[in-house]
């Protein structure tokens, strides 16, 4: 089997598992082939627009077809519209793919539909359809952030994410450059780099653990937390897995003690292996097994709807419902209350989410923390960072600003 046909088959199998509820990022950890990755993430990103293009030629909506057939149709349409594969080639490949997926009886239909789709010019459509987002997301973002930023955020979610890294020390960075990596700094995140040439040299350092891949927004939350606590004293990271922020906090802080916890035993196990010399616990952030009133910094990087991360997790767009935002609030409230109890006098709680929705950020955080002092973060941010201030004095980055979308708030316990 040609490599590209093999990639198509592997991508289709992953897409079928994702249809059943698996997470793309987890499956792609084990299959990093670019040909698989581009198809899996591309089909998920463009799913709504692809289904819209296919629908006029189908007797029932794509969502009601067998998963195997739906996947072949979506992938064929994606390859033509977004990878520039010639129509007849994509159609023949999808017929073969349908057969390999055990649906020989559907090959005639796949052939007929794809031939008609590839001969049709995409029509001009409203922004949510053009950028393949759910209509409710578009309406919500347009109302809250304005049409232009909302459309820019949707457009950015359709692009592959650049792999940004930080280096564990200057020597490792210099060594990568000596070996041929041409590094480019991030536009606003300090010490975040990507390779514009010599990517294999950077990859080799990532595998060795001296360069750490982390989205700039995630790096920035860790940097803000360290800066607000001056990097000293006792710090606890309550929702720490997979450990990106803890690792960077450990790297740039001078803590007396830094502990990381996560509710999931599986994730905490992986976290323990990643942060091998650090205390790691399996604990519910709503009832952390830590001494109250003893912590100079508590980071609560709370579970959330994740609306700032559609570029990395495109299947979320199709799984979330408007009510998911409210559900996240219910989950976070006990964690915020418990995190406040942990603070020593003068200690800082940094509450972050990778959601850009006000309801699961400032709207409830403000009411839960009204006895604490709001901490302004302006002096702790890079000048070039294009953030917007939330109604509770927090910091929000929208997902088209060279990183995932995120929101962060901080309060200090009064002495
Ligand atoms: C946004 S992720 C954290 C990402 C992490 N801070 C990083 O930078 O790599 C949220 C994490 O919260 C964990 N989580 C969910 N509910 C929790 C709870 N009640 N207590 C502690 N952790 C929880 C999830 O397992 C998940 O790993």
Image (cartoon, grey):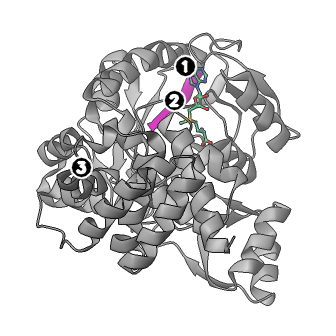
Residue 190 placement, left or right of 160: right
Near mark 3 (Cα within 10 A), the count class, few <14, some 14-19 or many ≥20, is some
Q: Main secondary structure of the magenta part?
A: strand
Secondary structure state at the residue bearing disc 1: helix
For this orientation, the residue located farthest to the right is: 277
Q: Nearer the viewer, residue 191 or 124?
A: 124
Q: CA distance from mark 3 to mark 2?
A: 53 Å
Which quadrant: the N terminus? bottom right
Instruction: Give the quadrant of ligand 1.
Output: top right
> Is residue 42 depicted above or below 62 in this figure?
below
Residue depicted at x 88% and y 39%: 277
Q: Residue 288 sits in which quadrant?
A: top right
Position in image of residue 198 (x %, y %): 70, 85
Separation of marks 1 and 3 at Cα, in angstroms = 53 Å
Q: Nearer the viewer, mark 3 or mark 2?
A: 3
Q: Classify mark 3: helix, strand or loop.
A: loop
Tell me if residue 117 can be seen.
Answer: yes
SS type, badge 2: strand
User: Residue drawn at (31%, 44%), measured in percent from left and top?
Assistant: 62
Q: Earlier in the sequence, mark 1 or mark 3?
A: 3
Confirm or deny contact between disc 2 and disc 1 (CB under 8 A). Answer: yes
Q: Nearer the viewer, residue 224 or 65?
A: 65
Q: Between residues 28 and 404, which one lies in front from this camera angle?
A: 28
> Which label is found at residue 58?
3
Which label sits on residue 368? none
- Res 408 quadrant in image: top left
The x, y position of residue 92, in whole percent, is 46, 71
Q: Which residue is mark 1?
A: 339
Q: Quadrant of residue 22?
A: top right
Q: Nearer the viewer, residue 371 or 140?
A: 140
Instruction: Write down the region rendered in magenta.
Output: 344-353
Residue at the spot of label 2: 349
């Amino acid at each position: 089997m040609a490599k590209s046909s093999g990639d198509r088959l592997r991508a289709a199998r992953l897409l079928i598992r994702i249809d059943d509820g698996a997470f793309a990022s987890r499956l792609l950890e084990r299959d990093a082939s670019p040909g698989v990755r581009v198809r899996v993430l591309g089909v998920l990103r463009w799913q709504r627009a692809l289904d819209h293009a296919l629908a006029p030629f189908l007797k029932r909506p794509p969502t009601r077809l067998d998963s195997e057939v739906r996947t072949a149709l979506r992938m064929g349409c994606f390859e033509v519209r977004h990878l520039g594969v010639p129509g007849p080639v994509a159609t023949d490949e999808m017929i073969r793919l349908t057969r390999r997926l055990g649906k020989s009886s559907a090959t005639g239909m796949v052939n007929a539909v794809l031939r008609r789709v590839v001969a049709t010019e995409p029509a001009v459509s409203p922004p949510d359809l053009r950028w393949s987002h759910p209509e409710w997301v578009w309406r919500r973002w347009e109302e809250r952030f304005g049409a232009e930023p909302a459309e820019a955020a949707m457009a950015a979610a359709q692009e592959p994410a650049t792999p940004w890294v930080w280096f564990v020390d200057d020597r490792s960075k210099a060594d990568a450059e000596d070996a041929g990596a041409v590094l480019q700094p991030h536009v606003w995140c300090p010490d975040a780099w990507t390779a514009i040439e010599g990517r294999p040299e950077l990859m080799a350092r990532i595998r060795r653990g001296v360069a750490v891949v982390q989205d700039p927004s995630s790096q920035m939350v860790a940097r803000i937390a360290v800066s607000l606590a001056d990097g000293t004293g006792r710090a606890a990271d309550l929702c720490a897995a997979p450990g990106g922020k803890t690792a960077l906090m450990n790297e740039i802080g001078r803590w007396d003690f830094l502990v990381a916890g996560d509710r999931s035993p599986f994730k905490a196990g992986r976290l323990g292996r990643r942060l091998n010399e650090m205390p790691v616990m399996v604990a519910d952030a709503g009832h952390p097994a830590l001494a109250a009133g003893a912590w100079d910094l508590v980071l609560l990087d709370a579970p959330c709807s994740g609306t700032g991360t559609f570029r990395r997790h495109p299947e979320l767009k199709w799984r979330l419902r408007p009510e998911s935002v409210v559900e996240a609030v219910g989950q976070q409230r006990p964690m915020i209350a418990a995190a406040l109890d942990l603070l020593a006098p003068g200690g800082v709680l940094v509450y972050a989410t990778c959601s850009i929705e006000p309801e699961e950020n400032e709207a409830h955080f403000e009411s839960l923390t009204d006895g604490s002092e709001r901490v302004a973060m302006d002096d702790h941010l890079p000048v070039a960072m294009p953030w917007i201030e939330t109604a509770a004095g927090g910091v929000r980055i929208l997902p088209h600003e060279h990183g995932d979308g995120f929101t962060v708030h901080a309060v200090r316990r009064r002495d």
